[in-house]
Amino acid sequence: MLRLEKRPAPSRFWSASAPILAVVLTMIAGGILFAFLGKNPVEAIRTIFWDPIFGEFAFYYRGQLLVKAAPLILIAIGLSLGFRAGIWNIGAEGQYIMGAIFGAGAGLAFYPSDSFLIFPLMIVAGAFGGWIWAMIPAILKTRFGTNEILVSLMLVYVAEAILASMSSGLLRNPDGMGFPGSRNFKEFPAAHNDFIIEAAGIHWGVVFAFLAVISTYVLLSRHLLGFQIRLTGESPRAARFAGVNPSLLIVFCLGLSGALAGLAGLFEVSGPAGQISIDFNSGYGFTAIIVAFLGRLNPIGILLAGLLMALTYIGGEAAQGNLGLPAAAIQLLQGMLLFFLLAVDVLSNFRIRRTKNEVA
Amino acid sequence: MDTTLLAVENLTKAYPGVVANDSVSFTVRPGEVHALLGENGAGKSTLVKMIYGLVRPDSGVMRWNGQPYEPATPHAARRTGVAMVFQHFSLFEALSVAENVALGMEDPPKMGELSARILEVSDAYGLPLDPERLVGELSAGERQRVEIIRCLLQDPKLLIMDEPTSVLTPQEVEILFETLRKLSAEGTAILYISHKLEEIRSLCDGATILRLGKVVGTCDPREKTARELAELMVGQTLHTPSRESEALGDVALELNSLNLKSANPFGTSLKDVSLSVHAGEVVGIGGVAGNGQDELLAALSGEILAAPDAITLNRAAIGGLGPNQRRKLGLLTAPEERLGHAAAPDMSLTENAVLTGTIREGLTQNGFVKWGAARDFANSIIEAFDVRTPGPENAARSLSGGNLQKFVIGREVLQRPDVLVVNQPTWGVDASAAAAIRQSLLDLAAKGAAVICISQDLDELMEISDRFAALNEGRLTPPRPAKGLTVDEIGLMMGGAHDMEVSHVEA
C-alpha cells in the first residue's frame, strides 16, 4: 500500500521540479488525447510546443510570444500576491475588461488630440478601472464578510455586460457606420500602445510586466509588507499576532491585483486588440490563475509560466490552423497543465512510502 | 509467580526515523496501580496503544494471565478485559450520557436497563453522574466520568488511563483517585500514564520509567522523591529555578474591569477582570483549560481590542492599541499555541524572529526588512536559549516542541519587555527545557520586568509565582500570595469560589 508522509520541511527539489514534471505529463496526456482525436500525437505536440520557437515560421511567432505573455504575467503577478495571503481574486477577467473600458474611454474622450499626456492618462485610468472593480469584493468582504471568490467571479459577468453595452453604445465609433466597436487605436497615434521593438513584440505592456515581476520580487523578499503577505497565507493567526491588519491586507491585495489586471486590459485594448469590441476579452484573466499557480506564486516562476502558457496559445492556434485540432482540445491541454501541477505538487510537502497494511 | 496479569516482553515498535519502543518489558499484577512515567516522546503512548490493540508491535510478546496476548483490534483487547480512557474524550455533545455510553459498548443493553446500571456503577465508585443529561452540559471532569463508567461497565481487568488529570481541578483529581483506589482494591489493575510526579507518588504502587523508547528503571514511586523520579525520567540532574531579588516596583500593568466578548462562539468571554502587576513580580494565573486563558492572552497581546482604559501599561491607556503599538511600549506576549500562532510553521527561524521583533529590535528600515540583522537576532536567541537546531534558516516546524518553545519565549525575553505575558510556557516541553524557560522568566522578573504566567500546571505556578489568581468561566479571582497557599485553597479558587476569597483578601 502506498502512503503519503509529511516531510519535516518542504522539499526544494520537488518544489522546483514539479512544474517541469507537470509539463512533461501534460505533453504525454495531451498526446494521448490528440491520438484519440485521430491526429499524430508527436506532430501535434511539436506544433504546439516546439515550432513556434524553433520552427520555420518562428520569426513571426516569437514576437507573438511576449504579446501574449505580457497580459498573462501582469495579471498573474497581481493575483499571486493575494493567493499567497489566502485572498482569492477569481475575477481578474472582469477587472481586465473594466481597465480596458476605463483606459480606452479616457483616451477616446480626447480624440483626436495629439498631446503626449494622453497615453499616461490612459494608463492611470486603466489601472483605476481595474482597481475600482476589485474594490467591490474587497469592501464587501471587509465590511460584511462576503466571499471574495463568488463576488469577484460574478462581477466578471457584470463587466462583460458593461463591455457589450459600451461597444455598441457610449464608446461606439461615431464613424463606424453603426457597427459595434470603438474607434481603432491604430488610427489614434497619441493613444496607441505601439510596439517599441516590433520584431521582439515589445510594447509598453511588456515593459510593465517586467517591472511588475521585478518589483514584486523585491516586495516579497525584502519588504515588510511582502513578509506580512506571506505570513498571512502561512498562518493567519500568527499574522494577527504579528500585528498584521487583515482588512488592510485584503484591500491592498485585491486592489493591486485589480489595478494590474486593469493595466493589462488597457495595454491590450490600445495595442494588440486595437479597439473595444463586444468580444474583446479572451480569457486572459482566467488563464492567469493557471499561470500564477504554475509559477508557484513566485514572480520569476510566473514570468516563465506566462511564457509557457503564451506558447500553448500560439502553438494551439497553429495546431488549429495546420492540423485542424478543435479549440476545446487546446483549452483542455491548458487545464491539464494546472491539474497535473496540483497533483505533482503533493510531492513537495509529502513523500510517498510503501507500507505494509497496518491495523487501523 | 502466577500473579502476573499482563507481562510485556521485549516489545519493539519503530516508526520511520524513530524507534518509539525499544525492547520494552514490564509486568502488571492484578490490583496494581502501575505508572508509566516519561517525558513527551518517551514512547508511553505507543506502548499503551500496542496493549490496547491500536498498533501492532514489530517484535516482542505480551502475555495475559500467562497466555499469549496479541490484540489485533481494540475490539479484541476489550473482550480480553483491557479498557482505556483517552486523554482526549470521544463523546458526542448532543447525546445524553447513557447514549454516549451505549455507543462505546460491544453490545449495549436496553436504554432503561443501561441507565440503571450507570447509576449503580456511578454510585458504587463515587462518580456522581446523571445518565439522562446531555454531555454538552457537562464539565470536563464529568465528561471523564462518562468515559470511565463506559469502561467500568465492561468489567475490565486492566484499565489504562492516559494523562487523566490534565483537565481536572484538584478536587476532581481527588475524586478520581478515590475511584481508582477502590477499583484497585477490587483487583482491577490500572496502568496510569502521567508526568505529574506527585500524583504518581500518591497513587501508584509501581512505576516503569521510559526514556527515548527504552525502560530506564522500575521503582516503587512511594519510596522516591519527586525530584529523584524526575531525574530518572530526564536522565540528568535537574536545575531548580531560583530567583534573587524580591523587591517590587511600581504597578506596571493594570487591568480595570476588563470585559471582552470572545470572538469565537465556543470561546469564553472575559468578565470584569481586574488585576495589577508590579515591576519585578511574577503573577501566576491558573485555571482549568477553556476558562478564558486564550482570550486573556489575546486581550493583552492586542489581538482583540478592549476599551482603552481597561488595560493600562505604566499608567498609559493601551486597551485600544494593536499588537505592535503595545510592543513598542514594552508589553510582549507569547501565546500557548506554538505552531500557527506564536510561530509560522513553514517559515524559517529568521523569519519567525521578524514576526514579533521588528519594532523593538529595529529589524526594518524604510519598510524593508534587514535580513542580516534578523538573522543575527535569531542566532542570538538560539545561542542564549540553547535552541537545538542546525541554524536559523531551518523551518519552525522542524524543531521539537521544547526547542521551538525556547525559541518563542527567548524571542520575547531578549527584547527586554517591561511586561511579559506567557500562556502555557512549558506545555508539552521536556523537563530540562521547562526548567530553563522558568528560570528565564524569573531572571526577567529579577531584572525588574513584570511577568504574567498563565498556566494549567499548578506545580509550575507555585514554583515561580509571587501571587496566584485563577480564571473560572472568564472571571479572575483576586490574586493571593502564592507562598502558603494550600491545595484546597487553590482548588476553591479554580472552582470559582469568588465570594469566599474576597472576604479574606487584604485591601
Image: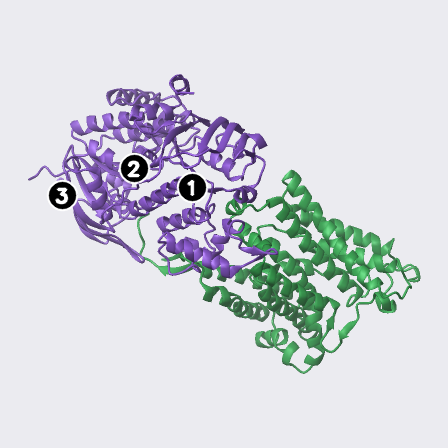
Tell me: B222 left or right of B94: left
- Residue holding disc 3: B67
Which mark, by number, is residue B474? none
- Chain for colour green: A
Of labels 3 and 2, earlier in sequence is 3
- Report whether mark 1 lies on the same chain as mark 3: yes
Between A304 and B218, the residue placed more toward the observer is B218
The foreground one among B151 and B320 is B320
Residue in front for this viewpoint, B252 or B283: B252
Q: Amino acid at mark 1?
A: Glu
Measured Cα–Cα span from mark 3 to mark 2 = 29 Å
Q: Could you say whether the residue bearing mark 1 is in a helix, strand or loop?
A: loop
Q: Chain of mark 3?
A: B
Instruction: Look at 63% across and 46% down and name the residue there.
Output: A248
In the picture of the structure, the residue carrying the numbered disc 1 is: B336
Residue underneath mark 2: B163
Quadrant showing the N terminus of chain A: bottom left
| Residue neighbourhood size for the residue with mark 2, other residues' Cα within 10 Å, grouped as few (<14), some (14–19), many (≥20) | some
Which residue is farthest bottom? A56
| Amino acid tagged 3 | Gln
Q: Amino acid at mark 2?
A: Glu
Q: Colour of chain B?
A: purple
